[in-house]
């Protein structure tokens, strides 16, 4: 999206970690923070003495967004427990289940559909995904 910025109306990136030391991609985050064509918000569950940013789980950032549910897609990547709460908040904001895109890459092993590690009922994450809409997987208990 950032490489083809003109193709997208607006881009918002939310980034969260347990602590400031666990924030990933710090060089990229610094770049995103400086861009005028991107809204970048970050949070940590627990700050330290040097942290001046938002403290709280990732969902504490969602109320700060202006979401037009008819024109918004959300790409969600993170631990399964985070998915549950982010999905609830985005659905409450009026987003459609098909517009919530979830990465299930964490379930993959072989990547070619042989080992069965990523199988969820009739779906193989490595072959059918690894990105699925919430609508596609909401009834697959092993997905979330």
Image (tube, rainbow, N blue to C red):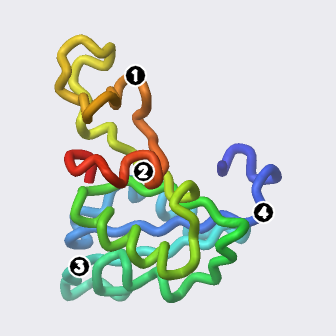
Q: Earlier in the sequence, mark 2 or mark 3?
A: 3
Percent from the top left, x then y, of residue 123? Answer: 34, 30
Percent from the top left, x then y, of residue 44? Answer: 28, 76
Q: In the rendered view, would you say 11 is above or below 55?
A: above
Q: Nearer the viewer, residue 49 or 64?
A: 64
> Element at badge 2?
strand
Q: Earlier in the sequence, mark 2 or mark 1?
A: 2
Label 4 belongs to which residue?
9
> Element at badge 1?
helix
Q: Earlier in the sequence, mark 4 or mark 1?
A: 4
**The C terminus appears in which quarter of the rendering?**
bottom left
Comparing marks 2 and 4, which lies closer to the viewer? 2
Q: In the rendered view, would you say 4 is above or below 85?
A: above
Comparing marks 2 and 3, which lies closer to the viewer? 2
Residue 102, labelled with which disc? 2
Q: Earlier in the sequence, mark 3 or mark 4?
A: 4
Q: Earlier in the sequence, mark 3 or mark 1?
A: 3
Residue 45, labelled with which disc? 3
Label 1 belongs to which residue?
127
Q: CA distance from mark 2 to mark 3?
A: 21 Å
């Amino acid at each position: 999206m950032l490489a083809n910025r003109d193709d997208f109306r607006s881009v918002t990136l939310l980034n969260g970690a347990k602590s400031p030391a666990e924030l990933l991609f710090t060089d990229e985050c610094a770049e995103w923070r400086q861009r005028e064509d991107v809204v970048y918000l970050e949070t940590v569950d627990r700050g330290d003495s040097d942290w001046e940013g938002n403290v709280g789980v990732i969902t504490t950032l969602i109320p700060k967004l202006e979401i037009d549910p008819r024109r918004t897609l959300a790409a969600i990547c993170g631990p399964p427990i985070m998915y549950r709460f982010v999905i609830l908040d985005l659905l409450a904001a009026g987003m459609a289940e098909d517009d919530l895109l979830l990465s299930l890459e964490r379930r993959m092993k072989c990547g070619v559909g042989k080992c069965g590690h990523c199988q969820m009922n009739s779906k193989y994450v490595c072959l059918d995904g690894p990105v699925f809409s919430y609508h596609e997987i909401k009834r697959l208990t092993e997905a979330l």
